Image: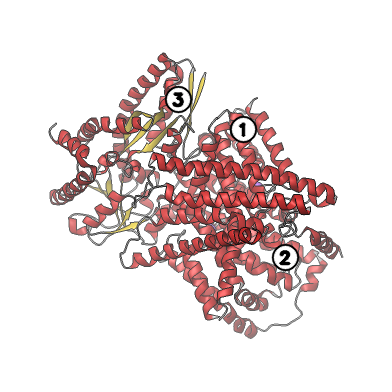
Amino acid sequence: MDTITIGILLAALMLGLLALGFWVSLSLMLVALVGIILYGSDVYGLIFASSAWSSASKWSLTALPLFIWMGEILFRTRLSEDLFKGLTPWLSKLPGSLLHVNILSCGLFAAVSGSSAATAATIGRMTLPELKRRGYSERMSIATLAGSGTLGLLIPPSIILIVYGVAAEVSIARLFIAAAIPGLMLLGLFMLYTIAWSMINKDARKIKSDDQFTWRDRFVALRYLLPILGLITFVLGSIYGGYATTTEAAAVGVFGSLILAALSGSLNRKAFLDSLMGAVKTSCMIALILIAAHFLTVAMAFLGIPRTLVSMIDGLGLSPIMLLVYLTILFIILGCFLDGISVVLLTTSIILPMVSAAGIDLLWFGIYIVLVVEMAQITPPVGFNLFVLQALTGKNILYVARAALPFFLIIGLGIVLITVFPEIVTALPAEMSRN
Amino acid sequence: MRKFLDNLYLGSGLIAGLFVVAIAVLIMAQVIGRWFNIIVPSTEDFSGYFLAASSFLGLAYTLKVGGHIRVNILIHNFSPKARKVQEIAVLVVGLALATFMSYWLIFMVWESWVFDEKSLGYVRVDLWIPQVPVAVGAVIFNIAVLDELVHTIRNGKPTYQGLDDEMEDLNQLTDSATTVEQK
Amino acid sequence: QTRWDLATGYGDGVHHTINIKQFAEDISNATNGALSITVHSGASLFPQGEIHRAVRTGQAQAGELFMANMGNSNPVFEIDNIPFLASDWDSARALWEVSRPAVEAHLASEGIRFLFAVPWPAQGIYSQTPINTIEDISGLRMRAYSPMTTELSMLLNASPTTVQTPEIPTAFSTGMINSMVTSPSTGVSSQAWDFVNHYTDVQAWIPKNMVFVNERAFNRLSADVQAAVLEAAAAAETRGWEMAIAEAETATQRLADEGMQISTPTAELRSALEAIGQEMGGTWAAKAGAEGISILEAYYSR
Ligand code: NA
Ligand code: NA
C-alpha cells in the first residue's frame, strides 16, 4: 500500500471511530496503532510505551494543569464577577459589549501563557458562566473564546514559536518581537468582527445595557479590576523581572490565585478540593489526548505521510505565492487530524529548505506557521480549543467548530494581510537590528 | 465491591490532584530558591514525573465523571437499543485499548528495571520508580473501563452517559440560540 | 531492500545532522539502495531522552545522542565533559581514543553497536560583562544544564541557574541569567548576539555526539551491507571531526561579525580555570572507579 492510500485509510478510520462516539483520545491512539502496524513495525507496544512516557512526563507541559487549576480557583472567587463589573461601564456603548471581555482577557492572558488550550480553559472558566448569566448568545461567547484563545500561541511567550525557532535556527527573541504586531492585529480583527456581528444581530442589540455611565462611574468601576490586574502584574512581573521562566509562571499564577482567593474569603477546604478535582478532570482529558496525539505523531513520522505530501508540493515547482497557497491548504488539512505543533515538527525539516529556496524570509514564515497552527486549534475533529470548550460547556465539538468558523476565517484573513503587507511582521525585528 | 471500586477511582483521582499540587509546590520552591541562590535540583525532571503520575492516576476518575470527551452528534440520534449496542461496542474496543495500554506500560516499568535505566538530569533517578504510578494509573483505568462494560451490559447505559454530553439539552440550546439569533 | 529509521534530537542546520545525512546517503550509494536510512531530525521521531532506549529495544534501528546524556548510566560517557582536561582538538582525539573501548563495551552490553562519534566545537563562556580574571565570574548567574555545569559554576563561585534551552533568550533578557557555557555553534544557532555581548574562548571542553545502531538489526544485514555501514561510519567520523574544526572557526567568526566581543583567556584566568578542572577531574575519577582511573592514566601517559 502506498503512503497516500494509508493516509486516506487512517483518516477514514479516525472519522468513523469519532462518529460512532469513541473517545477522542482513544480514537487517535487506535489510529496511531493501526498506522504503526501498517508501517510494519513489530514493536508497536514498546513504541506506544516510550511515546506515552516521554509525552506524559514532558516538563514544558506542566504549565497546562497549573493554568487550568488557576482558572478553577479564580472561577470560585468573586474575581470573574468583578472583572465584568469593572469593564461594563467601559464596554457598554461598544456593540457586543461584554463579549469583548473574552477577547481582551485572552489577549492579556496570552502574554502569560504559551499555549492556546490553557488560555481558552483559564479564561473560559471565568467568563463563560458570567456571560451566560447576563444573557449573551452562548454561541458567540463560545466562538469569541475559541478564536481568541488561539492568541496564546501568537502573543509571546509561545510554545510553537520556540519549537519553530529551534528547528529553523531563527532567533526566538526576534520571533517573539515579530509576533507582537500580528497578535494585536488579530485581536483588533476579532473585536471588529464582534462589533459587526452585534450590529447586524438584533438579539445582541437587545442585550446592550440601558444604563448610562458617566466618566466618573467608569473610573470608580476600575477598582473592581484591581485584583485581577494585580494578579496579571504579579505573574508578568515574575517573568519580566527574571524571577520565573515562562513555564514556571504557571505555578506563580496558581500561587497568586490562591492568595487572591484567600484574601477574598472564598478559599475553604471544599473550594480548594473542588478546584483541584476540576483541574484533574480537564487536564487528564487533555493529557490523554496529547499522549495519543504524540503516538500518532510518531506513527506519522514512521509512515512519512506529511513528508510525502510536502515533497509532492515541492515537485510542482511553484511560485512563492502559489507555494504559500498550497502549503496553507495542506496545513489546514493536516491540522484537522493532527495537533498543530506535531504538524510543524513533522514538516519543518523538509519545508524549510523549500521555503528558503523560494526566497521567503524564515522569520516571516515563523509567524505564518503560527497563524496556520492557530487555525488548526479550531478545526474539527482534532482541535484542542474545541476540546477545551466542549469540556467547559458540554457543547459538541462540531457545534463549537461551527461557532468558531468566522474566527477561523479571520485568522485566514490575517495570513492574507501579512502576505500582502509583510512589514506587519518584519518592521519591529528590523528596528531591533538597527539598534 | 461496588464501594471498593468507587473509592479506588476517587482515591486515585485525589492522588492525581495531589500530584498537581506537588508540581506547583516544587516549581515555586525553585522560583523562591533562586532568590537565595538555593538550587532545587532536577525540578524539570521531577515536575515531569509528577505530571505523568497525575495524568495517568486521574484517568479512571475522569472517565467516571464523564471528562473524556467524544463526538456525540450522531449517536444521540440512535434508538435506545442501537445506542446500547453502540456503547457496548465502544467499551469493548476501549477495553482492548486500555488493556493494551496497561500491558505495555507495565512492561515498560519492568524493562526500565531490568535495563537499570537512569534519568538524564542532575539527580540520578532509577526510571522505573516514577514510571510505577503511570502503570498503576493505566491499570485502574483498565479496571474502570471493564467495570463500565459490565455495568452497560447489565443496565443498558454507562454511568457517564449524560455526564459527558449535555446532548439532552443541547438541542434546545442550539434551537434557542438559532431562534434568538434569527429573531 | 532494508529500511532503517535513525532518530536524532538535533535540527538540520547542525553539523552533526548534516554529517549523518551524508552518512545515510553514502550507505545508500555503496549498497545500491539495499539499505536506506531515513534520518528523523529535530526530535521528530523520538525526543532526546528516549533515543537510547528506542534503539536498544529496536523501536528505531539507529540513533544519535549527546554522549554525556548517558553519564548517569556510566561516568565514562561524560569524560569529555570534564572541564579543561582535553580542550584542544589533538587532546580531545587522544582522550576519545583511550575512552572509546569503554564506550563501545558499555553499549555492546546493552545490545547496541557503537558506530561513530563527532565532537562539538570547544565550549566557551558567554557573558554580558567581560571576563579577564576568575573574580569576574564570581557572582554571575550562570546557566547550568547538567551535573557537570552545575558543579563547575559552583566552583567558579557563580550561582548555577537551571534554564531549559528554549528559555535561554528570555532568561538572558530578563536577567535571570547573565552567563552560560556553550559552544560557538550553539551561540550562532540561538543567535546569542541578540542577548549577550562577550564570548570568552576558554576552550573548556569538547563534548561529542555518538551514533549507534541496534545490534540485532545490524546482524540481520548481509555481510557486504554490514561492511558498507562500518566503512561509511569510519568515513563519517573522520569527516565529522573535520566539520567540527571548520565549524568552530566559522561560528566564532560569525559571533565576531555580529558584533560580539571575542576574547581569549588571559594566562591568569587560564591557570585558575585549569585548577578547577583538576579538581573536577578528581571528582569524576572518584565516581568512575577503577575503569575511569585507568582511562585517565592512559590519557596522561600518552
Ligand atoms: Na502566549
Ligand atoms: Na484541528
Pointer 2 residue: A195
The kind of residue on which mark 3 rests is: Ala
- Whether residue A21 is visible to the viewer of this picture, yes or no, is yes
Ligand 1 near label 2 (Cβ, under 8 Å)? Answer: no
Q: Secondary structure at mark 3?
A: helix
Q: In the rendered image, which residue does mark 3 sit on?
A: C217
* Front-lying residue, C119 or B162: B162
Residue bearing the label numbered 1: A309
Residue A114 located left or right of residue A435:
right
Quarter occupied by the N terminus of chain B: bottom right
Tell me the number on the disc at residue C289. Answer: none
Tag 1 secondary structure: helix
User: Label 3: how many residues lie within 10 Å, few (<14), some (14-19) or many (20+)?
Assistant: some
Are dots 3 and 2 on a single chain?
Answer: no
Q: Nearer the viewer, mark 2 or mark 1?
A: 1
* CB at disc 1 and ligand 2 closer than 8 Å: no
Report in which chain the residue with disc 3 lies. C
Picture residue at 36% right of the left edge, 24% below the top: C233
Q: Are the residues flagged by discs 1 and 3 from a single subunit?
A: no
Q: Amino acid type of disc 2? A: Ile
Q: Amino acid at mark 1?
A: Leu
Task: Classify 10 Å Cα crowding around label 2: few (below 14), some (14-19), many (20 and above).
Answer: some
Quarter of the figure with residue C82: top left
Taking the image as shown, residue A252 lies to the left or right of residue C292, namely right
The residue at 25%/40% (across/down) is: C79
